């Protein structure tokens, strides 16, 4: 199950960075956005979670450090990137849930997104399916 985010109005780049920061502290999800898809090689995105993960920890950690200033643990590097980037479609970002989320988890995600994006003035829609 995924919670897809569509962002409206500037600053889109800063909003995506804020969503990436949220994801680091949410072990129950993995994420994908257009910047991850573009900036990390397709091989890195495909191999995350597989046996070759140790080879790719540094690029993933470096990506998040450079973009968000957040240090991502080695363990989290292995699980933070979704393998389903092709499913972004018209959305800017998604949180992919490891197991079907409870209503309270979805409400908590919305609250966190509201808090993260409020200072930016960026609006969004969320669709979970």
Image (cartoon, rainbow, N blue to C red):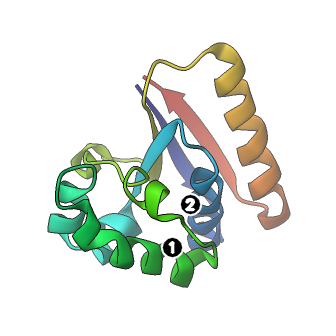
Q: Secondary structure at mark 2?
A: helix
Left or right relative to 118: residue 28: left
Task: Say above or below: 95 vs 13.
Answer: above
Q: Secondary structure at mark 1?
A: helix
Left or right relative to 117: residue 65: left
Left or right relative to 121: residue 71: left
Nearer the observer, 9 or 56: 56
Disc 1 residue crowd, few under 14, some 14–19, many 20+, Cα 10 Å? some
Task: Say above or below: 21 vs 109.
Answer: below
Name which residue lies at 27% across and 66% down: 54
Name which residue lies at 52% across and 44% down: 5
Residue 52, x across and y down, in percent: 17, 61
Name which residue lies at 52% across and 47% down: 6
- Marks 2 & 1, CB-CB < 8 Å contact: yes
Tag 2 residue: 20
Q: Quadrant of residue 35?
A: bottom left
Q: Could you tell me how many numbered marks the image carries?
A: 2
Residue 109, x across and y down, in percent: 68, 36
Residue 58, x across and y down, in percent: 37, 78
Q: In which quadrant of the rendered image does the C terminus lie?
A: top left
Task: Say above or below: 91 vs 38.
Answer: above
Residue 31, x across and y down, in percent: 44, 49
Q: Earlier in the sequence, mark 2 or mark 1?
A: 2
The residue most toward the bottom is 66
Q: In which quadrant of the rendered image does the N terminus lie?
A: top left
Name which residue lies at 46% across and 51% down: 93
* Front position among marks 2 and 1: 1
Disc 2 residue crowd, few under 14, some 14–19, many 20+, Cα 10 Å? many
Tell me the CA gap for discs 2 and 1: 8 Å
Tag 1 residue: 64
Residue 95 got which mark? none
């Amino acid at each position: 199950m995924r919670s897809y985010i569509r962002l409206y109005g500037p600053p889109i780049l800063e909003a995506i960075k804020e969503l990436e920061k949220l994801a680091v502290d949410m072990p129950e999800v993995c994420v994908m956005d257009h910047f991850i898809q573009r900036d990390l090689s397709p091989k890195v995105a495909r191999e995350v979670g597989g046996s070759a993960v140790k080879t790719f920890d540094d690029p993933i950690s470096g990506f998040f450090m450079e973009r968000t200033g957040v240090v991502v643990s080695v363990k989290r590097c292995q699980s933070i990137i979704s393998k389903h980037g092709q499913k972004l479609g018209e959305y800017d970002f998604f949180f992919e849930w490891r197991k079907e989320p409870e209503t309270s988890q979805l409400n908590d995600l919305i609250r966190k997104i509201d808090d993260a994006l409020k200072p930016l003035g960026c609006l969004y829609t969320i669709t979970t399916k």
